[in-house]
Image (cartoon, grey):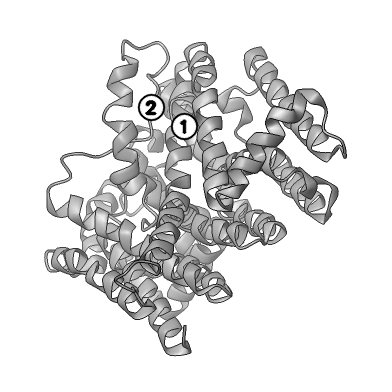
Amino acid sequence: MSWTLRAAALALCACHLLLGYSHNFLVGPDDDRLWLYASGLARGQSAEAAALNARVHESLTRLDRPDSQRVRFALREGYEGNYAGAAVVHGATARIAGRWLPHLRDGDYPAFLGRSMYASFVAMFVVSAGILLLVTGLAADDRWWLAMVLAIAGIGFLESVFDLTGDTWSGLPTLLPDAQTNETYLQNLWPNLPALFLNPQIQLSPFGDTPRNHFILLMLPLFLLRWTGRITASYLFLAALGFLHQSHTGLVLAYLVAVDAVLRPAIFRSRTAFVIAAVLVMFVGRESLGAIIGVGRPIVIVTGATAALLIATAICWGLRQQMARAAAPLARLRQRLLDRGPAFADLAVLGIILAVSFPVVAVINAMGTEAQSLYFWTQVHGRSLGIFRPALMLALAFLAVSRLQTTAWSWTPARILGLAALALAPGLVEATMHDRHPIARIERQARPLEAAVGPSIDWSTIAAKSEAEIYYAIARTLDRGR
């Protein structure tokens, strides 16, 4: 493939990425995005941020607020280290905006927030998209360039088509019923499970504006590295993603180690093992949500220990020069999967792990508290499917490219790129319906928050306000330095 076509491939990827992001960009200054923005500001003002969080805790206690509100605030406070890389980008962009627009920051904060939030969220997506394009550009096999374009085009095409038809069928990550409720398994599995693959909504879209969305987007280059034979580089890439979304990094690490224990045990006696160990140490050392999701419960400890033992056993059997008779079926399975290609093998083992672990997690979920269930166990499989969905799209795209180039129609790279360009059509139609003033929209939605918080913040009663108002007060205080 010529450099002209390669440049066209990267340009098409960029077009789909930007168009997809424009459909999902920042609904407004809600509690989640205000918290994320404030956590970026806290990077350079840790003492001030800690003091403000302490004031909110005091108010929660003084006003005897519900446990659910306390848990949510504690959860977010503990999550601040989870998104360190994203927080750096958000904080740096906001500080630049403060230097350029001090008159707005100090005189009309909603107007300043509209500009600062817009710039910081766009900057983070541009960084993520740039990393994807860079890794794609390093691939030697032209088929993977084409597959990346088709994968991104396919995801964007599906999102736009479902948006245009009213989003009447979409999926959420909650595949298990909440603990201590009357929900049924069927209510959660349908339509969520099949719809997660086709229309997962903004929660699990690779085009969204949160660290979770960026993490999902960057699964494309991570699996591209794996499937082009750079396993060690893929784990190094995962280590870097730990600064984007700490919790999801641990989840993906567990899955990939299990997959490689079955398919590639030899990597565990190479330098890759040291990289895996480093990622694990980073995760364990930085993870702060264990108590909230109940990892200390006996059933969770026993399940985790059993899974670790099974992985260790698979590695030991795989490293033996003469396979034991008991491990012969594993060796045959490994060879049959790898004969179909690394993409098929990885996804097949991932599917088996998800299917086998589902009933186990269902038991753990049913025996936990409502908070533990709500914040993790009901969603662990749904989020896993959402995280790995881009990898599935990439594998299907690679299969499509391989088939198209060997058919009688003789699909050249130029024709395949033309197909990806046609997939822009629904997104372009949808774009004509957009609110074309995102900064004004953020500013407009911030003005009621400004009125509710008031010019002088009463921190003793702040817990009586909505979560969006609380984080707006924290962000304004950090932005202004007072």
Q: Which residue is mark 1?
A: 381
Q: Position of residue 63 (x, y in %)?
A: 41, 25
Give the residue type that dot 1 points to.
Answer: His
Q: Callout 1 environment at 10 Å: few (<14), some (14 to 19), or many (20+)?
A: many
The answer to whether the residues at label 1 and label 2 have Cβ atoms under 8 Å apart is yes
Q: Position of residue 68 (x, y in %)?
A: 42, 24
Q: Callout 2 environment at 10 Å: few (<14), some (14 to 19), or many (20+)?
A: many
Residue 209, compared with residue 284, is above or below; it is below
Q: Is residue 385 visible?
A: yes
Q: Is residue 63 visible?
A: no
Q: Nearer the viewer, residue 18 or 28?
A: 18
Indicate the quadrant where residue 248 lies.
Answer: top right
Picture disc at residue 73: none
Q: Which residue is mark 2?
A: 175
Secondary structure at badge 2 equals loop
Residue 264, compared with residue 161, is above or below; it is above
Give the residue type that dot 2 points to.
Answer: Leu
Residue visible at 55% across and 42% down in the picture: 79
Q: Nearer the viewer, residue 410 or 262?
A: 410
